[in-house]
Image (cartoon, rainbow, N blue to C red):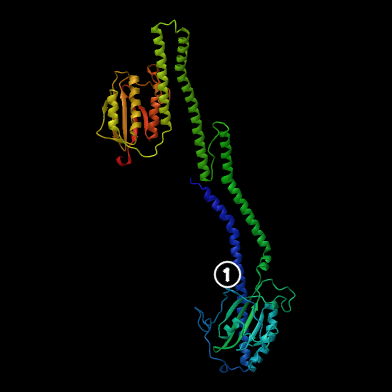
Amino acid sequence: MGRLSIGTVLLVMALAALTLPLSGLWFLRLYESALLRQTESELITQAGVVAAVYRDAWRRAGGRTEELGPPVDPPWTHPPGFDAPWTPRFAGLDLAEDPILPAAPDPTPTAAAPDAATRTAGASLGPILREAQRVTLAGMRVTDPQGIVVASTGEDLGLSLAAQEEVRHALTGNATSVLRERNSRYQGRAEGSTAPERSRSLRIFTAHPVLDEGRVVGVVVLSRTPRSLADTLYGKRWHLAGLAVVLLASVGVLARLGTVAISRPLRAVTALAKRTADGERGVMAPVQRPIVREVAELSDALTRMAATLEQRADYIRDFAAHVSHEFKTPLTTIRGTVELLRDHLDTMSAEERDRFLANMDAEAERLSRLVRRLLELARADVMRLTEEVATDAVPVAARLAARHGATASLPPSLPVAMGAEALESVLANLIENARRHAGPEARVEVALTPEGDGAVLRVSDDGPGVSPANAGRIFTPFFTTARQSGGTGLGLAIARGIVEAHGGSIALRPAERGALFEVRLARPDDDA
């Protein structure tokens, strides 16, 4: 079953912990823009109603379109998807995209005066605007075609708004909405209101042209401070508190998941590793049912490592005992001979002295042979291949077979993935082992054949063979049944170490007579 990786678990946890608050901030930013567009949409709706009322009042007062400027064709008159007579406007302000303009300039005095129809229409509209402001809280002003205020909820009748950018656009027939900084005159209380003005630092202005037969009759200018995000959030404080609780609970659940999936099994593995380091044996075991793949792999690797170290420690302990035993006998013989010669050298005959010296020389030779074999075994145990090697095994096998008086059955050529020196050491150990145990007169045969993508080397003899009781121990270091004839019990162990280091295998195979050793070797890639 596939397990999640530590990186995946931590990534999911981090994303889950960060996405919720970050998405909340993103949502609040969108919500703040939505509040602006909601206020703008309300102002557009009110401006449309005020424009319709004002145009009707201007017509009843005797206003004539022939006296106005040329017709205009504002781009918003027929937006895509709408045909006459529909001329909708849609809110589009966005805090992230639209600039925030300075506070609106104060209305300026002007020498010009509105015509009679405009003054009459404005006078009839003024009370309506002031009454509507009590509900909408919006500042409302209506200008004539020159930008002079003819109806207002404030104190600016007869003043000009032509210096205001959005009003200038509206006088050309273009409806416009802008964001401006709040002016000090909007910082107090709304007219007739007992509630404090909201704390936003922005104010929305929308200028809507009043059109009659395509000509600008006037401009409706509405402004209002949008509802602040702080006020909105305060109204949703209990919902936000619930969200905070959910976030904290989610973090707690994620922390618990991290503990169960990662921290707890790692602590268990660490505790077992410490007990193993303190010398306890057999305590390291894989974690049961791990969730995270890396924890499972780490636990399995540490378990295998602990088992390998324990096996290596057992091997070293047994190896040291064997070495001590093998060295003890010749050293004891040499020491006893030295003491004997020291005490009785003067009374010994020449024949006795030569015999004792020969014994010492034989034991010294045995020690020298043991040291050489131990060095070869150490090299075989730590042998590591750093690059691919290849040797034609046929000349090596032919040379060693001739040297030891063995018969050979060899192909013309057969490259193997092993160095010449290593191959010679393996083959020499096998042939010497056969000669030592089968006897000098025994028939030893060396055969080399290709098989599949590898090569098989067989060394057989017609001697007494290996007994079933000893068959499982012949590759154990220092095990030998020919100690009296100079056997050290290391030859087969050395051969196995070299073969396994090269990715091959060596085994004792059943034979009708004598012993049969089979070595399987890999062939070079270009010869496989």
Q: Residue 455's spot in the image, x, y percent?
A: 31, 34
Would you identify the image quadrant in which residue 517 lies? top left
Q: Which residue bears the numbered disc 1?
A: 96
Q: For mark 1, give the secondary structure.
A: loop
Q: Nearer the viewer, residue 137 or 356?
A: 356
Q: From the viewer's perspective, is 355 left or right of 285?
A: left
Identify which residue is drawn at 66% across, 70% down: 228
Front in this rendered view, residue 428 or 465: 428
Query: Which percent across, then down, holds residue 154?
Result: 70, 83
Q: Is residue 99 above or below residue 213?
A: above
Q: What amino acid does circle 1 point to?
A: Ala
| Residue 239 found in image quarter | bottom right
Q: Is residue 472 visible?
A: no
Of all residues, the one furthest to the left in this rendering is: 412
Would you say residue 324 is visible in this rendering? Answer: yes
Horizontal side of 183 relative to 22 (left or right) equals: right
